[in-house]
Image (cartoon, rainbow, N blue to C red):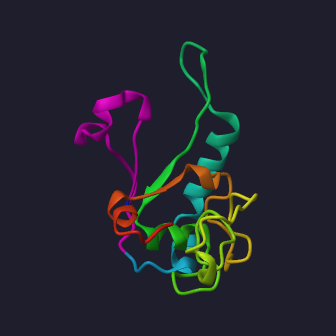
Amino acid sequence: MFTACILNEYDAVLSLSNQHCIFLYTGTEQYDLLNQAFNFLIDELLTLNVEGIVDSTNNYWKIEFWFGSDWKFMSLVLGTKGPMANYFCLYCDCKNTDRWNIDLNYENLCNILGQKKPNLLPFLANQHCVPDELHIMLRITD
């Protein structure tokens, strides 16, 4: 399920009444099936990202997209390899054997070496992809 909310709503963001379902997918979590199922939605989101929205009073609203999900689904949508791959990180080209080394510095903010398939949301900056709190607290992401 893909839902949308307006982040500027502050505390009301977490309210059920502010969660809007924009896509419900009942198939299995496989890249090719997801790509086929919501290709139409990707085009709409790309248009919104580029053009924004002009409301009935002729005000222009720029749209800034953020993506949150569990690590597995986020990796699938972003087209990166799984957690056991040499280059698993959603955000950089950290090799799995180097993830303990906090002295390393990565200039790029995306995973190039671990890219398996094209990103299903190519307009979305990796800095705007946020794994859920459970996976962060379990240290599944670094």
Task: Indicate whether residue 13 is drawn in magenta.
Answer: yes
**Residue 93 location (% of width, % of height):** 69, 71
User: In the shown orientation, is residue 113 left or right of residue 96?
Assistant: right
Tell me where the magenta segment starts and ends, as one range: 2-26
40 lies above or below 14:
below
**Residue 79 location (% of width, % of height):** 62, 73
Residue ID at (43%, 35%): 7
Residue nearer the viewer, 108 or 75: 108
**Corner quadrant of residue 122:** bottom right
Task: Indicate whether residue 94 is drawn in magenta.
Answer: no
Residue ID at (24%, 38%): 15
**Residue 135 location (% of width, % of height):** 37, 66
Residue ID at (64%, 42%): 49
140 lies above or below 122:
below
Q: Residue furthest front?
A: 103
Residue nearer the viewer, 90 or 100: 100
User: In the shown orientation, is residue 129 left or right of residue 120?
Assistant: left
Residue nearer the viewer, 40 or 31: 31
Q: Quadrant of the N terminus?
A: bottom left
